[in-house]
């Protein structure tokens, strides 16, 4: 089955997924394999992050206070209005604290500066050596 599915000549391969699925079903029936479905991972970083996000949303929704509307119209902003449009839901991404990302970014910026200084120093040394050899070439020959 694998040899046919991966054949070099397109005419030798399965025409479509239905034909491949029918062949798989025939093999499973011939071997009397039980019905089996691969379970989804339960402890992946994506699952933990999504569960944390949804639990925080539910906590915010439960604690909210509904305002009672009145017939009086006011032109002022309510005192409890939040001036910030965006607030981070969580201090984590995929189980990693966001502060760790900031530290890693600062470290990367420092390393770029260190490597830039090393490259400039080596370039300067090569230039100085070439200039010295070039200016004293008559004495060396």
Image: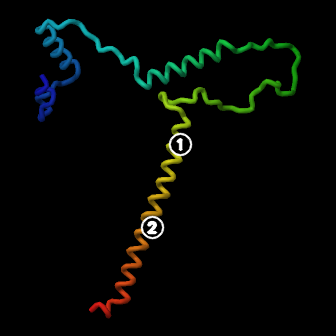
Colour scheme in use? rainbow
Q: Is residue 12 left or right of residue 96?
A: left
Residue 102 x, y percent position in the rendering? 54, 41
SS of the residue under disc 2: helix
Residue 131 x, y percent position in the rendering? 39, 83
Q: Residue at x 49, y 24 (%)?
A: 49
The residue closer to the viewer here, 73 or 47, is 47
Q: Residue at x 12, y 22 (%)?
A: 1
Q: Residue at x 53, y 32 (%)?
A: 97
Mark closer to the chain start, 2 or 1: 1
Q: 122 above or below 98?
A: below
Q: Residue furthest front?
A: 139
Characterize the local packing of mark 2: few (<14), some (14-19) or many (20 or more) Cα atoms within 10 angstroms.
few
SS of the residue under disc 1: helix
Query: Label 1: which residue?
Result: 103
Q: In which quadrant of the rendered view does residue 81 lie?
A: top right
Q: In which quadrant of the rendered view does residue 27 lie?
A: top left
Q: 36 above or below 102?
A: above
Residue 53 x, y percent position in the rendering? 54, 22
Q: Is residue 83 left or right of residue 5?
A: right
Query: Label 2: which residue?
Result: 120
Characterize the local packing of mark 1: few (<14), some (14-19) or many (20 or more) Cα atoms within 10 angstroms.
few
Quadrant location, the C terminus: bottom left
């Amino acid at each position: 089955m694998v040899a046919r599915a991966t054949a070099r000549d397109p005419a030798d391969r399965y025409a479509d997924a239905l034909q491949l699925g029918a062949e798989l079903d025939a093999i499973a029936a011939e071997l009397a394999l039980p019905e089996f479905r691969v379970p989804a991972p339960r402890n992946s970083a994506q699952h933990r992050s999504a569960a944390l996000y949804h639990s925080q949303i539910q906590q915010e929704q439960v604690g909210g206070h509904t305002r009672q509307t009145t017939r009086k119209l006011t032109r002022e902003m309510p005192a409890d209005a939040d001036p910030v449009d965006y607030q981070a839901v969580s201090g984590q991404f995929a189980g990693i604290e966001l502060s760790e990302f900031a530290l890693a970014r600062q470290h990367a910026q420092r390393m770029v500066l260190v490597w830039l200084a090393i490259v400039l120093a080596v370039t300067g040394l090569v230039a100085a050596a070439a200039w010295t050899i070039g200016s004293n070439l008559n004495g060396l020959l």
